[in-house]
Amino acid sequence: MYYLILQHPGHNRVYFNSADKLALAELKLASRRLSSYPKEEPNVVLIEDIRYLAIETQVELIESDLEIISRLSFVFALFKSKKLEDISCLIPLKKKPYLSLEEKISSILKYQGKTNELFTKMMINVALLSSDFGYSDNIKLLDPIAGKGTTLFEGAVSGFDVYGIEIEPKSVHESIIFFKKFLEEDRFKHISGKRQIYGTTKAEAIWISEFEYAKTKELFKSKTPNKKLGMICGKSQDAFKYFKKKYFNLLVGDLPYGVFHGNTTGKINEARTRDPSRLLSKSIEDWYQVLKFGGVAVIAFNTFVTSKDKISKIFTQKGFKIMTDIPFTEFEHRVDQSIKRDIIVAKKENNNQL
């Protein structure tokens, strides 16, 4: 049986010639989770001059397989066929519903330097598909360099509990106001609040703004756990001060690209730097502590600013395992003249089975 995927038009618009490469890499990773492993590696095919991503399986995919495929960042429409190149044999398949929030949330908020939401969605999928966890688990995701929250919003769309750390107060404030307005306009039942999460004095106090929400009043009051989103104005290197040990399944974020903004490790009067490895070196210990065994960190970075080898070394020295086989080597792509983007996929393995 053949399964043909029509790519999301936004994916093509953003990544141009890289679209096929990135989509194939994500699909190859997802195929490892399917109940019927593809006969061959997924590939790109042209049918009546329309481009599809194709996989061939021994038997028809089951419901859980179709849910995995439906969640992929590039999937616009899905078809199955017993013949590969006969368009009359294409049978459209309904994508499996999984949205906890409407996908529009990630595209509404616009700002300079924003990472495209389709790429962010891809990173989240890569993290989960590389981990020891599945979509049916109660996934908790942390973006320790959250900016204005694109990763959090994409994680919330997938039904995860999401938390972010961001050092810029203005970004945190705007993200919280935006999310509250979104819940109100889409008539979600929700409660929100702010509580101190760290510090014994007023000067060192760190606060978290939190939301608990559900689609309806009935769901909010039911025994099913409500979804959660929280954002902290604080330092990425202090993640373990804010959260419990082994609290998160996934850690996903964009290191500063050194184009629209620099980064800081949080020291008073410290100048901003274009080198994201400094921020990573300061933060990696706390990132490791708050991630569960079997959890995965996926971090994007600009290879024009720092090398993949340098980023990999920081992760491996802490004890992470870097994924280096195909398709993990196929995510590098040119964004513009100043940004060539790649990702690191790093797993926290439990070697001692503790």
Image (tube, rainbow, N blue to C red):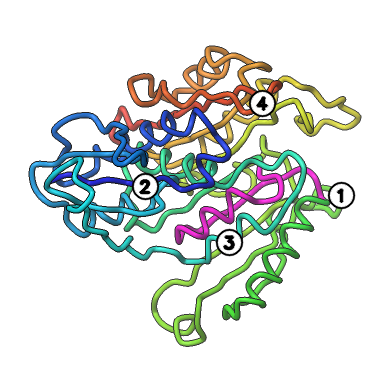
Please tell me which residue lies in front, 221 or 53: 53
Q: Are marks 3 and 4 in contact (CB under 8 Å)?
A: no
Q: Quadrant of residue 336?
A: top right
* Residue that carries the numbered disc 2 in the rendered image: 6
Number of the front mark, 2 or 3: 2
What distance separates the C-alpha of mark 1 from that of mark 3? 38 Å
Pointer 4 or 1: first along the chain: 1
Give the secondary structure at mark 3: loop
Which span of residues is magenta-colored? 146-169
Q: Are marks 2 and 4 in contact (CB under 8 Å)?
A: no
Q: Residue furthest front?
A: 48
Residue ID at (76%, 30%): 263
Pointer 2 or 3: first along the chain: 2
Query: Which label belongs to residue 95?
Result: none
Q: Position of residue 106 (x, y in %)?
A: 61, 55
How would you rate the neighbour count of disc 1 (Cα within 10 Å): few for under 14, some for 14-19, many for 20 or more?
Answer: few
What distance separates the C-alpha of mark 2 from that of mark 3? 20 Å
* Residue that carries the numbered disc 1 in the rendered image: 203
Question: On the picture, is 116 further left or further right than 261?
Answer: left
* Residue that carries the numbered disc 4 in the rendered image: 336
Tell me, yes or no, if residue 131 can be seen here: no
Question: On the picture, is 134 further left or further right than 57?
Answer: right
Residue ID at (39%, 58%): 138
Q: Quadrant of residue 86?
A: top left
* Residue that carries the numbered disc 3 in the rendered image: 104
Pointer 1 or 3: first along the chain: 3
